[in-house]
Image (tube, grey):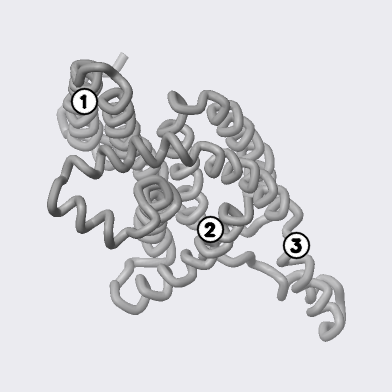
Amino acid sequence: LAGALGLNIVLGFLPTVLVLISEACFKQGGRAWSQHQLQQLYFIFLVVFQLLVVSIANSLVHALVDFVHNPLTLVERLSFGMCRTTHFFLNIFVLQWTTLGLEFTRYVQLIKYFLWKKICATAQEASDYSEPEDQDYYGIGARNARCASIFVIGVAFVSLCPLISLLALISFVLIRIFLGYQVVYAETRKPDIGGHFWVTSLKQCHYGLLIYVLCMTGVLIERARTRVPGAVAFCSIFYLIESIYVFEQRFYWKTICHEQVMGPKD
């Protein structure tokens, strides 16, 4: 539990670091686009350091060296490690409930309000100074990345530890209740860019399924008498890659072709 808590604390400071790097090194069209880039980068860090590094090896350098010499060791390490870290990720989900509860109390804004109240003349003025919340951690980009990473972890371990599906369900129910209230009634309105965050989250869920396929392939190769079950499981990755291609290339959500606009209407 202490390890999961420490990992959550460290990763909690990561959005601020990524936003500073993004604003210093990249030219963004606005704050919303900076949040979108944060969503992409933060998700990669969460999957790599919260899921893969914990599961694959104690040393990332040694794992990379072994991968260079023999790429198949990645699948072996992934299956071997994930089978033995299920309890750690159960703790991750339980800690998520605590984090969501703390976010719902908006304790940071409450502390800032009481501090500003000692300086400001009126309570309304103190309330105005205590807003908005930290847009790096509580922004739409970081929140979407965390939700997508929770989904990926739940999917990756659902066959190894079916109990994790129940914990993941509870987590998303709490997210719907707490964040659904906060975003609408408590927090400042956040800028959106027309569905990019939602589509990026769906793509990240697709990529998470790749981890699930590789994990189950390694588990079946390790535990089955022959490699046939693992080979059959690995074949599903071709359908998944084709599904990702269809999703990214054949669904029009940004624009619509002229023929569809001018077509017959019912």
Height in image: 163 above or below 27? above
Q: CA distance from mark 2 to mark 3?
A: 21 Å
User: Seen from this angle, which residue lies furthest left?
Assistant: 69
Height in image: 33 above or below 17? above
For marks 1 and 2, the one nearer the N-term is 2
User: Seen from this angle, which residue lies furthest top?
Assistant: 266
Task: Say which mark, if any, is on residue 30.
Answer: none
Task: Tell which of 158 and 44 is nearer to you.
Answer: 158
Give the labeled residue for mark 2.
Answer: 7
Pointer 1 and pointer 2: residues touching (CB < 8 Å)? no
Q: Is residue 48 visible?
A: yes
User: Residue at (78%, 66%) from the top-left corner?
Assistant: 110
Amino acid under disc 1: Phe
Query: In the image, residue 137 lies at what x, y percent?
Result: 54, 61
Give the labeled residue for mark 1.
Answer: 234
Left or right: residue 246 versus residue 16 is left
Left or right: residue 133 versus residue 214 is right
User: Residue at (23%, 33%) from the top-left corner?
Assistant: 244
